[in-house]
Amino acid sequence: MIYGKIWLYVKPSTGIPVYLGAVAIAAFAVHLALFTNVPWLKAYYSGSAGKAVAAAAADAAPALPATVVAKK
């Protein structure tokens, strides 16, 4: 273990819950950021993802490459 000596300064009964709490808070923050900033995620969780995808596909034009390479 690379950081094994940390337990000489921090009691495991304190350090482990703090570490796991920090991981849980970070995971919650990432999911909250995704849920508030990604427009299709709310529709997916509410069950209307198929309608939202169909509407988005109808509005968006397909991206075509600027140049076409001919086969020889």
Image (cartoon, rainbow, N blue to C red):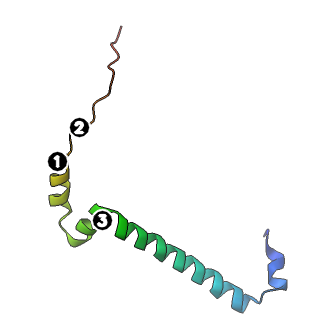
- Where does residue 66 sit, x and y in percent of width and height? 32, 25
35 displayed left or right of 3: left
Q: Which residue lies at the image location 21% right of the left edge and 45% below the top edge? A: 60
Kind of residue at badge 2: Pro
Mark 3 or mark 1, earlier in chain: 3
Mark 3 to mark 2 CA distance (whole Å): 22 Å
- Where does residue 56 sit, x and y in percent of width and height? 20, 52
Q: Quadrant of the C terminus?
A: top left
Residue 59 — which label?
A: 1
Mark 3 or mark 2, earlier in chain: 3
Query: Please, is residue 28 above or below residue 53 in the view?
Result: below
- Where does residue 16 sit, x and y in percent of width and height? 67, 85
Q: Nearer the viewer, mark 3 or mark 1?
A: 1
Residue that numbered label 2 is attached to:
62
- Where does residue 7 sit, x and y in percent of width and height? 80, 83
Q: Residues within 10 Å of mark 1 (few under 14, many from 20)?
A: few
Mark 3 to mark 1 CA distance (whole Å): 18 Å
Query: Please, is residue 7 above or below residue 36 in the view?
Result: below
Q: Residues within 10 Å of mark 3 (few under 14, many from 20)?
A: some
Residue 37 — which label?
A: none
Residue 41 — which label?
A: 3
